[in-house]
Amino acid sequence: MQLFDTHAHLDDRSLQEILGPLVLRASEVGVVQIIAVGTTADSSEQSIRLAESYDSVRAAVGIQPNCCHEVKEGDWDRVVAQAEHPQVVAIGETGLDRYWDDVPFPLQQEYFQRHLCLSQETSLPFIVHMRDCETDVLEMLREVRRSGVLSGVMHSFTGSLETAEECVELGMYISFAGMVTFKKSDELRAVAAAVPAERLLIETDSPYLSPHPVRGQRPNEPALIIHTAQCLAEARGITVEQLASDTTANAQRLFQWKREDK
């Protein structure tokens, strides 16, 4: 059984001293591919260095919406240049967030638009952060879809079934993290059960969102994705092996990264 963790912040300080054992533990449960996701220009650079160091890791580069107000002169140009690196397979994490009130929303929208355009220019898929702003994200995705093909993933999805359905219609994949395993997440599991098999992805969002039954464990890490896979398989009425096969094939197709040797 092979698993693909489509979203992990491996550059996070809480993971730095355990990266070697972390990657080994992941491989022991079948996690053979991991996307290290950047949140700033510096974080993206670190993610690239990790991808250069570990065969099972590739990088995504971008500026997370809650970090847009910290951008320094030249940072966006760095991200654009980073997108050309051979170990980079995605743009992001980008998107919008109305939960936190640290970053002016128009600034978030400006940077989301930049990432969407960069995705189309590079033909790399983009990774969307969406919190308390489903309508805003959908409006921007619809607009960009009018000018070209959308290729991306709604990461750590917690939205409604209607939003998931429209995202799929627009060409997006839907990824679920540890929150779908929480005991009170019945509605989210119902959404996950309804996503078409060919558009379903899984992730850890490490070091955050440790899944049930290890919800209290800190930090979260890619090896724990097995719990999310088991939960989704049960919700969808299939075996965990089938769930792993479907989601890994989907991720390999989206990120154009297929490991023939594993």
Image (cartoon, rainbow, N blue to C red):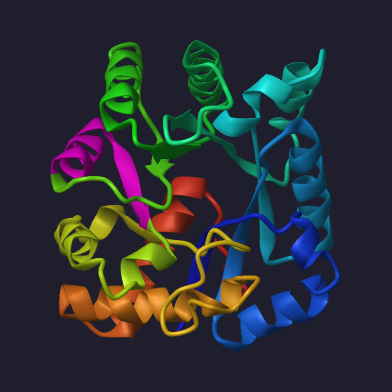
Residue 15, picture quadrant? bottom right
* Residue found 15% across the figure and 48% down from its top: 161
Q: Is residue 212 above or below residue 165?
A: below
The front one of 153 and 13 is 13
Q: Residue furthest bottom?
A: 28
The front one of 91 and 212 is 212
Residue 260, picture quadrant? bottom right
Which x, y percent locates residue 253? 43, 52
In-image side of 259 versus 129 (left or right):
right
* Residue found 16% across the figure and 42% down from its top: 165
Which x, y percent locates residue 85? 75, 37
* Residue found 74% across the figure and 56% down from its top: 12
Q: Residue furthest front?
A: 101
Query: What segment carries the magenta color?
Result: 162-175
In-image side of 247 versus 113 (left or right):
left
Residue 164 colored in magenta in the image: yes
Residue 206 colored in magenta in the image: no
Which x, y percent locates residue 103? 57, 22
In-image side of 94 versus 195 (left or right):
right
Does residue 63 appear in the picture of this structure?
no
Quadrant in which the N terminus appears: bottom left
